[in-house]
Amino acid sequence: MSTFPVEAVSFNGRDAEAPDVVRIIEETRRRSRCKWKDFAVLYRSHVNRDDVVQHLAEHEIPFTIENMDVSDTPEVRDLFACVATVVDLGSDASLFRVAALRNSKWIRNSFAMRCVRSQRSRKRERSFHWLQFWTASPVVRQCWTACAVARNEVDRKQAKTRAAMQLIGEQFGLNLDSAVLQAALKFAADWEQKATTETKELGEWIEYLGYFREACGTIPLASKENEDAVRLMTAHGAKGTRVFARFHPACYQPFFSRQLSGEPGGVSSRVA
């Protein structure tokens, strides 16, 4: 049982919530001399989480997002786009992303954006082909060259998916030491060990990844249990978690008034 009384605090509006949560964490830690990892923020949606993350970063407070899905992060999407382009140069969306990765100014070019809109409006017309645009861009030709170099290196070393992704990431200058890309590489390595995996080649991996996304699969970011950092987690994933203080974004007073028939809500609860 908890040895502390539960403290329920409600805010007047959503804008005040994230900065006040961060302020309370700082004040409570300073007053109680506890560690950052003794605080947890439970969120229902990514919007609630991102607001708190922004303010934690601004105050230089260490934090970790437990079981975060890295598959939609820009770094992982860049890596997957590079891999898809190496496997198939006709992968238009992936090639476009890789070109943007290598030259962000080019992607903002008005002619490029007009071509994108034109392709979307004519995607059912065979008369329009992306090559009319791709071959005219020196940036895309550079991407093709980089893809050819990466493909040759993969073939020369006969690299399977995990090792091939490492080679491709290095060829395109990605930061493979980042936690999210390490999670993606581990996911590929684990896939190679599955009983259903046959060739372990990049082509099979791309096909599997398509089915994986259709099934709404996630690639979790492993958290470090002993890391001294504020822990952000979903309300569902927090079951059984014991911390000094928990914060629940989206519990500002107008929200709770609707949910609990006028009763004030709470964002903070002290737990033994």
Image (tube, helix red, strand yellow):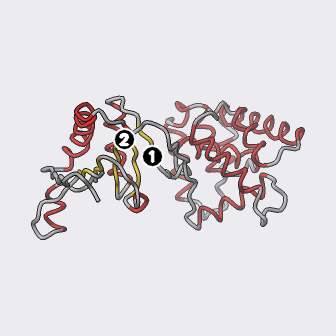
Q: Is residue 38 left or right of residue 194?
A: left
Give me the residue at 54% from left, 57% from top. 120
Identify whether 259 is placed above or below 268: below
Give me the residue at 82% from left, 48% from top. 160
| Residue on which the image places disc 2 | 53
Identify whether 169 is placed above or below 73: above
Give me the residue at 16% from left, 68% from top. 260
Quadrant location, the N terminus: bottom left
In front: mark 2 or mark 1? 1
Q: Amino acid at mark 1?
A: Ile
Q: Give whichever of 149, 19 is nearer the camera.
A: 19
Q: Give whichever of 139, 251 is nearer the camera.
A: 251
The picture quadrant where one finds residue 107 is top right
Q: Earlier in the sequence, mark 2 or mark 1?
A: 2
Give me the residue at 25% from left, 43% from top. 21
Identify the element where label 1 is drawn: strand
Identify whether 194 is placed above or below 103: below
| Residue on which the image places disc 1 | 65
**Residue 263 percent across, percent down from the top left:** 11, 65
Q: Give whichever of 178, 211 is nearer the camera.
A: 178
Identify the element where label 2 is drawn: helix
